[in-house]
């Protein structure tokens, strides 16, 4: 083991990794450099990154223009904060550009440094909004099974994945979950999109009524669920959900941490999925991962309350981070957005996304353990399950079907991810990906899946 690998093994506490296994065996891969869609490791081996890191490196690796923007801003003004009405120029320009791209009805951005802190801010905004309105009971937040909203004390509970709750005493008591619109596991046989959407909206309404509408503050959802399985909502789903929320004065938060800034082939995922949110969270694609930055976009309905006379009783808005509106992060975001605009990468995400989804459907069509290939824009997944006479059944978790496929693909030089709740393998490459790179990713994962399928017989 090389010196730095040994340092990593001994001293780094890795996120979402087996603590003991890592301490004994060390890193699977140690990345040293990257260009476009390709990572080079410490042995000089190259890997095609078909996940853009963690769904974030939208413009690809190695962009000099963003590196220069970071360096220039660090030299000119390395840091200043936004507390007490202090301001910096890059954050002001960025906020205007974000609002410019956002759906109608949004006028303010609250910056942070991660998707988790953005969704934490959302929860506090919902509570503050309802306190100002004199509705202090209206605090519960409903999320969905499989939704991914972060890992903080609040957002780890909003995330609907049992692995993020067990061992951490989550969710907090004001959090509830409803079913995800999953074609394999929650859609009933013969149910069309309209009936499926209506049933899930009814489930939400039943929960709100059971809890008491006066206690429910918000519903949070990703336009297309990412880490929970790349779950694309059926036609009519979000409009049906919105009708229920409006009936009971419940806010809608769109978690666009993955979808925002082009991943679905649209600047924002909400309009592309029929979602009309009151609040929006963004992160990842705003800087393509070159710097940590998140944003909470506040819609006019909420802003009027927060900035209205009723809020005066609380004085200063008592929330913010040291790195809120960090000028260096904002400079990275501005250079990133310049690249996305000038190279037409949102349209390219749509075009390459269509290519990827067609390629997946074609390549995996004949494999008996494929329950579904699905996706929208440059987000896609293949779901593996056991075919039985009664329909699809989940593989036993101990068989680690998804992780085995992902490991075999990595050995062949392609990076994809096994999603944490079941056996779906995801693809989310940089928007600059070429058809040849997509073909390579798809054929490598197909070969890995074929080998695992044979081993299961
Ligand atoms: N929301 C969504 C939809 C995400 O995919 C993620 C991370 O993958 C988060 C929130 C949390 O972001 P972070 O890991 O930056 O805290």
Image (cartoon, rainbow, N blue to C red):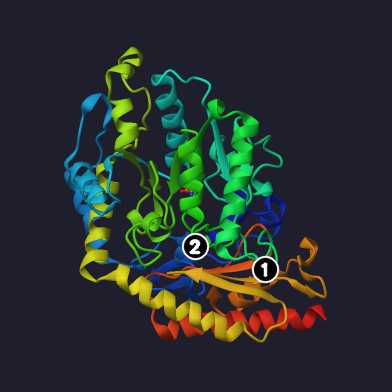
Q: Can you give x and y, in whole percent of width and height, for residue 220 in the image?
A: 50, 43
Disc 1: which residue: 190
* Residue ID at (56%, 86%): 362
Residue closest to the eye, 8 or 272: 272
- The crowding category of the residue bearing disc 2, from other C-alpha atoms within 10 Å (few below 14, some 14 to 19, many at least 20), is some
Q: CA distance from mark 2 to mark 1?
A: 15 Å
Disc 2: which residue: 235
The correct choice, above or below, for 137 with respect to 5 in the image is above
Tell me if residue 213 can be seen: yes
* Residue ID at (65%, 36%): 170
The correct choice, above or below, for 247 with respect to 194 in the image is above
* Residue ID at (77%, 84%): 454
Q: Earlier in the sequence, mark 2 or mark 1?
A: 1
Q: Can you give x and y, in whole percent of width and height, for residue 271 in the image?
A: 37, 57
Tell me if residue 12 can be seen: no
- The crowding category of the residue bearing disc 1, from other C-alpha atoms within 10 Å (few below 14, some 14 to 19, many at least 20), is few
The correct choice, above or below, for 204 with respect to 215 in the image is below
Secondary structure of the residue carrying numbered label 1 = loop
* Residue ID at (41%, 68%): 33
């Amino acid at each position: 083991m090389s010196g730095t690998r040994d340092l990593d093994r001994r001293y780094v506490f890795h996120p979402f990794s087996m603590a003991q296994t890592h301490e004994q065996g060390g890193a699977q891969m140690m990345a040293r450099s990257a260009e476009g869609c390709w990572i080079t490791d410490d042995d000089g081996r190259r890997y095609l990154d078909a996940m853009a890191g963690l769904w974030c490196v939208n413009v690809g690796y190695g962009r000099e223009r963003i590196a220069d923007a970071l360096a220039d801003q660090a030299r000119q003004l390395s840091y200043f904060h936004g507390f007490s009405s202090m301001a910096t120029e890059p954050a002001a320009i960025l906020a205007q550009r974000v609002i410019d791209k956002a759906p109608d009805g949004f006028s303010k951005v609250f910056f942070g440094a991660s998707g988790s802190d953005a969704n934490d801010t959302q929860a506090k905004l919902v509570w503050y909004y309802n306190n100002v309105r004199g509705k202090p009971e209206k605090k519960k937040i409903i999320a969905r099974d499989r939704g991914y909203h972060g890992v903080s004390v609040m957002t780890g509970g909003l995330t609907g994945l049992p692995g993020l709750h067990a061992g951490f005493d989550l969710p907090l008591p004001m959090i509830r979950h409803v079913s995800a619109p999953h074609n394999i596991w929650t859609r009933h046989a013969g149910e069309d999109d309209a009936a499926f959407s209506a049933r899930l909206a009814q489930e939400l309404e039943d929960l709100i009524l059971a809890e008491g509408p006066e206690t429910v503050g918000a519903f949070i959802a990703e336009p297309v669920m990412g880490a929970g399985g790349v779950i694309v909502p059926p036609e009519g789903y979000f409009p049906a959900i919105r009708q229920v929320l409006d009936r009971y004065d419940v806010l809608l938060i769109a978690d666009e941490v993955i979808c925002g800034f082009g991943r679905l082939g649209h600047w924002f995922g909400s309009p592309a999925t029929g979602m009309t949110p009151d609040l929006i969270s963004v992160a990842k694609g705003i800087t393509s991962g070159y710097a940590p930055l998140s944003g909470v976009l506040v819609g006019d309905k909420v802003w009027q309350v927060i900035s209205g006379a009723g809020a005066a009783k609380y004085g200063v808005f008592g929330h913010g981070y040291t790195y809120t509106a960090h000028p260096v992060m904002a400079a990275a975001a501005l250079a990133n957005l310049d690249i996305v605009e000038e190279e037409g990468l949102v349209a390219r995400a749509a075009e390459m996304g269509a290519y990827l989804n067609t390629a997946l459907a074609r390549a995996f069509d004949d494999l008996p353990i494929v329950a579904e290939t699905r996706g929208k824009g440059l987000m896609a997944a293949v779901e593996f399950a056991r075919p039985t006479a009664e329909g699809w059944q989940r593989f036993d978790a101990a068989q680690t079907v998804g992780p085995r496929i992902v490991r075999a693909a990595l050995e062949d030089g392609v990076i994809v991810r096994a999603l944490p709740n079941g056996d779906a393998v995801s693809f989310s490459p940089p928007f600059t990906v070429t058809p040849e790179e997509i073909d390579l990713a798809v054929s490598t994962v197909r070969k890995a899946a074929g080998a695992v399928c044979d081993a299961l017989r």
